[in-house]
Structures are given as structure tokens and as C-alpha cells.
Image (tube, rainbow, N blue to C red):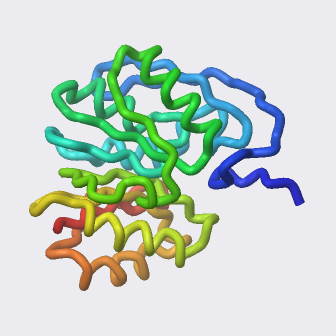
């Protein structure tokens, strides 16, 4: 079996770049996507719903965890340019496109290779935003959610999107004892957007 999952460090699929674009809160954005990276050629529905559900203002240090080709981190930094945006992914091809897409859209971000929070020891954030790699399995993504709490400043939030049929309700139950408060920001298109406050 080829190592072709988007959460693999080095996808074996041949690179096949594809363009896509969308407008976020009045900012037209252009991206190059690729094979072996989540959602080649288009902004996936879950990420779009997550972006639309974010608060009217974000500030401080923001982590886009599992950034893929960069739609979340680039959109956030373009919309709230005073934020300090970090973008992390285990997939090296994804990180390469994230850096190029950030430059293309005129935003400054910090991209780094990290399997979950493994390369982020000691780093603290005001928000962690993620469309988690569901196909990596519940154990992997729940570890990400628990680790996020340890990397959030007091009052900081984890924002995530999860498909209802892929375990949104059990995810909500998992988060509730870990965080001071968990709320549903949106339920549309078969997805839930959750905000978990530290």
C-alpha cells in the first residue's frame, strides 16, 4: 500500500499542483494545492464552515494545527494582520505549499514540521484552530485536542470542525471535562464547529 495519506510525512503520490481560490471576509485569496495533501483543488466544506464560524475578532498567537496547504492560517493572518500565526503539519509537501501560499497572499506566518504538538514544546497560543485528520483515528485526534489545552494561554480557545457522522457528539463529550466550557458555534452541512475554552 502506498504511503498516500495526507497525514503521512512524505506522500508517495506524484506531485500534481492544482490552483484554487476563495474570498474570506472580503479578502480574495489564491492557493496552489497538490496531490498527497488534504483537499487538492478546492477548499473543503468542513474548513469553509470552520472559517465562517470563527469569531469576529482574533488576536495574539494563533496556531493552525494540521495546516495542509494553508487555507486557515493564511485566511486568519490576512483578516487579522496583527495576529502572530503559526502553521504546523506533519506533511512536508503540505508545509512547502503553505509557505508558498502565505507569500503569494502577502502574509507572514511561521511554518514548521510537527506531528501534533511534538515540535511545539513550551509554545503557548491564544487560539488553536484545526480541521483534524479524522482518518488518522480517534486516538490521534483526541490526543491533539488534549495537548491543545496544555498549549493554550488562560482564556484561550480550541476551534475545531468535525462531521456529525464521524463522531461530533462523542467528541463534544470528550472535550467537556477537559475544558472550562465547550460550545457549538455552528451545525451546518453535516458538520459541527466546536469552541473549547481553557
Taking 161 as reference, is 31 left or right?
Answer: right
Question: Residue 4 or 51: which is nearer the viewer?
Answer: 4
Q: Residue furthest left?
A: 155
Measured as percent of width and height from the top left, residue 55 is found at 19, 45
Measured as percent of width and height from the top left, residue 17 is found at 71, 25
Question: Residue 117 or 131: which is nearer the viewer?
Answer: 117
Residue drawn at the location 44% of the way across and 74% of the way down: 142
Taking 9 as reference, is 152 left or right?
Answer: left
Measured as percent of width and height from the top left, residue 22 is found at 46, 25
Residue drawn at the location 47% of the way across and 35% of the way down: 70
When asked about the image quadrant of residue 26, the answer is top left
Residue drawn at the location 42% of the way across and 51% of the way down: 65
Question: Residue 5 or 150: which is nearer the viewer?
Answer: 150
Q: Looking at the picture, does residue 37 appear above or below residue 174?
A: above
Quarter the C terminus occupies? bottom left
Q: What is the tally of numbered marks visible in this picture?
A: 0
Q: Residue furthest right?
A: 1
When asked about the image quadrant of residue 88, the answer is top left
Measured as percent of width and height from the top left, residue 168 is found at 44, 72
Residue drawn at the location 68% of the way across and 24% of the way down: 18
Quarter the N terminus occupies? bottom right
Question: Residue 26 or 120: which is nearer the viewer?
Answer: 120
Amino acid at each position: 500500500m502506498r504511503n498516500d495519506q495526507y497525514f503521512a510525512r512524505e506522500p508517495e503520490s506524484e506531485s500534481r499542483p492544482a490552483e484554487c481560490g476563495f474570498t474570506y471576509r472580503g479578502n480574495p485569496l489564491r492557493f496552489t494545492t497538490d496531490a498527497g495533501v488534504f483537499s487538492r483543488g478546492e477548499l473543503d466544506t468542513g474548513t469553509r464552515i470552520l472559517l465562517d464560524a470563527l469569531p469576529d475578532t482574533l488576536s495574539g498567537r494563533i496556531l493552525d494545527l494540521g495546516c495542509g496547504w494553508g487555507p486557515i492560517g493564511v485566511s486568519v493572518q490576512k483578516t487579522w494582520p496583527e495576529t502572530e500565526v503559526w502553521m504546523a503539519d506533519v506533511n512536508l509537501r503540505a508545509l512547502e505549499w503553505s509557505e508558498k501560499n502565505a507569500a503569494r497572499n502577502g502574509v507572514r506566518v511561521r511554518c514548521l514540521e510537527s506531528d501534533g504538538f511534538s515540535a511545539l514544546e513550551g509554545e503557548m497560543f491564544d487560539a488553536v484552530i484545526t480541521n483534524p485528520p479524522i482518518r488518522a483515528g480517534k486516538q490521534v485526534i483526541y490526543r491533539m485536542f488534549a495537548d491543545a489545552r496544555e498549549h493554550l494561554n488562560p482564556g484561550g480557545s480550541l476551534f475545531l470542525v468535525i462531521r456529525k457522522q464521524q463522531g461530533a457528539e462523542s467528541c463534544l463529550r470528550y472535550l467537556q471535562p477537559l475544558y472550562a466550557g465547550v460550545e457549538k458555534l455552528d451545525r451546518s452541512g453535516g458538520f459541527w464547529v466546536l469552541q473549547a475554552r481553557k
